[in-house]
Amino acid sequence: MPQTPLCFFAASPLFHRRPWRLASGVGAAALLLGLAGCGDTARLPAEAGVGPSPELPEPRKGLIPTVHIAPAKGWPEGGQPQPMQGMQVTPFAKGLDHPRWVYVLPNGDVLVAESDKPAKPQAEQESQGLAKKVRNWVMGKVMARAGSGVPSANRITLLRDADGDGVAETRSVFLQGLHSPFGMALVGSDFYVANTDAVVRFPYAAGQTQITAAPTRVTDLPALPINHHWTKNLIASPDGSKLYVTVGSNSNVAENGMAAEEGRAAIWELDRASGAKRLFATGLRNPNGMGWAPGTNVLWTVVNERDEIGSDLVPDYLTSVRDGGFYGWPYSYFGQRVDARVQPPQPDLVAKAIVPEYALGNHVAPLGLAFAGPQSANGLPPQLAQGAFIGLHGSWNRKPRSGYKVIFVPFQAGQPQGMPLDVLTGFVSPEGDAWGRPVGVALDGKGGVLVADDVGNTLWRVSAARP
């Protein structure tokens, strides 16, 4: 992409020496939005950043970060994503309000968290300096183009497919009045929700279509005042005794200081009986989806890695999660590759950094994760019977774009093997607009994969094509 005169001006010494002042925040914002078109272009093919041994070139940190988003448009009439050969896709439910996460109850009812980032308190907004206000305003505009930043519905909707035709006939408000909900888990008669600031618990009875009971606050989670990565996910241990909760970082690479990262960039372990919690794994910049690899007691997660050191760095990844493990953030990535932006360095911590098992590509933004195994596959084609379905929300910091699809990573003997398969694509139009963006994924136990699309406001169901 040719560089504009504004990009050349931003790269010149004059831009950085001149003590210029803009007359208004709007003028500064216009300049920054113009500069957002500057940035580097990938020199490696997308697949170079995928697999157990991704190619990791030298960092390329520019003066202006690459911003290359597919503007959110929604699906045209009759439009839908494209499934892999031998599969079909149908809308399980349309007209949702920014659906982010999916959870299937034992009776087959499907729960969808309709949610977005919480609004910052007015007092906090007013206390910010002009530079921070302008930056936040610009980032808000950028995220709005990507389909985020809408008012949060703060509810969980229940969808029921009573006749088993792959389309929900009924929907009801299962829970409302939540606080940017994301992860969900049912253990016995206890239903847990990960709000942005706390894990809460509700009583649940099989077949229930609405919960009106008041929540019990189980534990607080790191949230305001910054709450950069607001999504909090949770999963129960196989025996139901523990909950594991993801908390993303408060920054890209700790530019807000490490004090702002306390308890973040981590997965917490919460004991259900006592309420005690501890850090289970750290150095995970923004973990989201979690799952137990079938046939094992090994927890896996997908992680969004750091930005702004080039379109060819850093690969997001899928990894097993070791008790007490440290995965590098913010000091290093993919093991001992030091990020020089983070000062002071921590060589002792870097030496302990665990190398992730499987790179998913640069800036693809993996969010959803659902494992298929011999029993859970239930009618899926053989090539999708053992492995991980992953929702790639899509890049903002890479040219050309990456992600914007659902993939399947095959597993053998509890480990990822080979290159991923594209399961659901076609979320971006030929003109570069986002018709949809995949987030949470879940298996419905009936041979279907459910995919939350937060731009298309649809829950899609992918299944084997009918004869």
Image (spheres, rainbow, N blue to C red):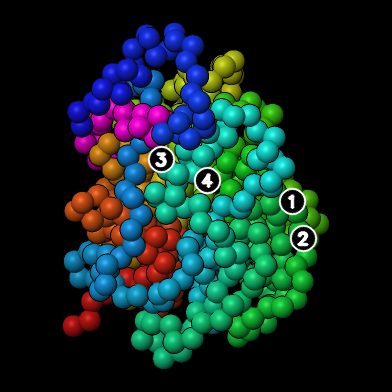
Identify the amino acid type marked 3.
Asp
Identify residue for label 1. Answer: 220
Horizontally, residue 89 falls left or right of residue 126, namely left
In front of the other: 403 or 57: 403
Residue linked to disc 3: 316
User: Tag on residue 287?
Assistant: 4
| Residue at x 38%, y 82% (from the top left corner) | 167
Marks 1 and 4, how far apart at CA? 18 Å
Instruction: Kindly identify which residue carries mark 2.
Output: 217
278 part of magenta stretch: no
Query: In x, y percent, where is residue 54?
Result: 31, 34
Q: Position of residue 149 (x, y in %)?
A: 50, 52
Give amino acid for label 2.
Arg
Q: Earlier in the sequence, mark 1 or mark 4?
A: 1
Boundaries of the magenta span: 31-55
Report if the CB atoms under discs 2 and 3 are less than 8 Å apart.
no
What kind of element bears circle 1?
strand
Mark 1–mark 2 CB contact (< 8 Å)? yes
